[in-house]
Image: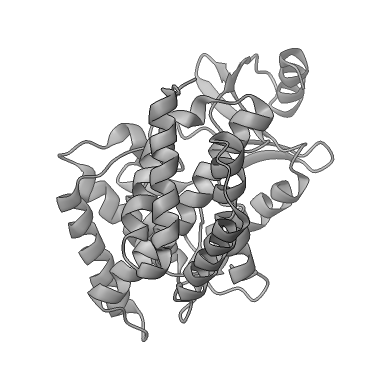
Amino acid sequence: MNNLELKEYINSKVKNRRFTISEIKGDASKRKYYRAEEENKSLIIMDSSLEKRNFNNFLKYTELFKNNNIKVPNIISEDSDKKILIIEDLGNNLIYDKTNKNNLLKIYKSAIKNILNIQKIKNKNISFYKKEKYFSESSLFIEWVIKKFINLNISKSDENKLIKSLNFLVNSINNKSNKLVHRDYHSKNIFFKDDKITIIDYQDSLYGSPIYDLVSLLNDCYRDIDHKQKNILINYFLSEFNQDNKFNFSKDELIYNFNLISAQRHMKASGIFCRLSIKNDRHNYLQHLNRTFNYILKATSCHINLKILNFFTKEVISNLNESNYSSSR
């Protein structure tokens, strides 16, 4: 839809209003978001016409989370034919913007408590985060970062070693106690207002490792958290999780799995960022590559079987530096 069509659409759904429409940039999916504003009101339009499955999932999980007291945006109007939603505008309350060194621990502890509340949800109709999916996501690093973005010529032998290492990685992730996970639980998908957490972009939720959302939050693609605060938050999660669950993590086991999931998640993320740049001329995510690579470097140093992944991550960083490739392009 163009802006005129959007105006006509929203005015047909919200009577006696005259909104101005502006696109909200920054989402990595095919969905498009717009803010509709008038003098005393603003709404968000979510256009999922190119992601029809996710539209249905968004509706499903919105209902599920609301029924389990997890705060999500209110849906004001839905159009199942056009795959368009008009939803509540949560304003400028992303934790990405609201946190600083003085309030970060308070806000992030609330976000962690929200993770644990999400994990209590039981629903037999939700799929599991299977090892095949972990692997296919991780392999984006080989295909889109190493081969296509950096253009490294790797031998068949090295590629086989990389694949073997990825298999070790995904098979080592502890899924003994699968919990419902958001799967994109980072500072640009979490709002904090009136001392309460509200989440968005939850349509890809699955049952998976209970540590996954913690990794997304603390090893965030878009921001850094200093080591001391991160350790406090990891200890907070560990204490709260072990109180709530029969299956307990030791600190060493949690850190080991935290590193495995961090490597997996950031190989996926860096692959997506590079694919968006190459296929869609969307280069704005490249500014976050160095952070994702550093997460991978640290995570893959934890086990000898991940050595080949660590080596090629260093090669990627070295080639980027040598080419003086601008991360913002």
In the rendered image, is residue 321 in sight?
yes
Quadrant of the image containing the N terminus: top right
In the rendered image, is residue 213 in sight?
no
Q: Nearer the viewer, residue 78 or 94?
A: 94
Q: Where is residue 294 shown, x and y percent of the image?
A: 34, 45
Q: Where is residue 93 shown, x and y percent of the image?
A: 38, 34
Q: Where is residue 277 shown, x and y percent of the image?
A: 59, 29
Going by the image, does 148 lie left or right of 298? right
Q: Quadrant of residue 115?
A: bottom left
* Residue furthest to the bottom: 246
Residue at the image point whose x is 47% and y is 35% from the top: 90
Residue at the image point whose x is 67% and y is 35% from the top: 31
Q: Nearer the viewer, residue 114 or 185?
A: 185
* Residue furthest to the right: 81
The number of discs equals 0
Q: Quadrant of residue 320?
A: top left
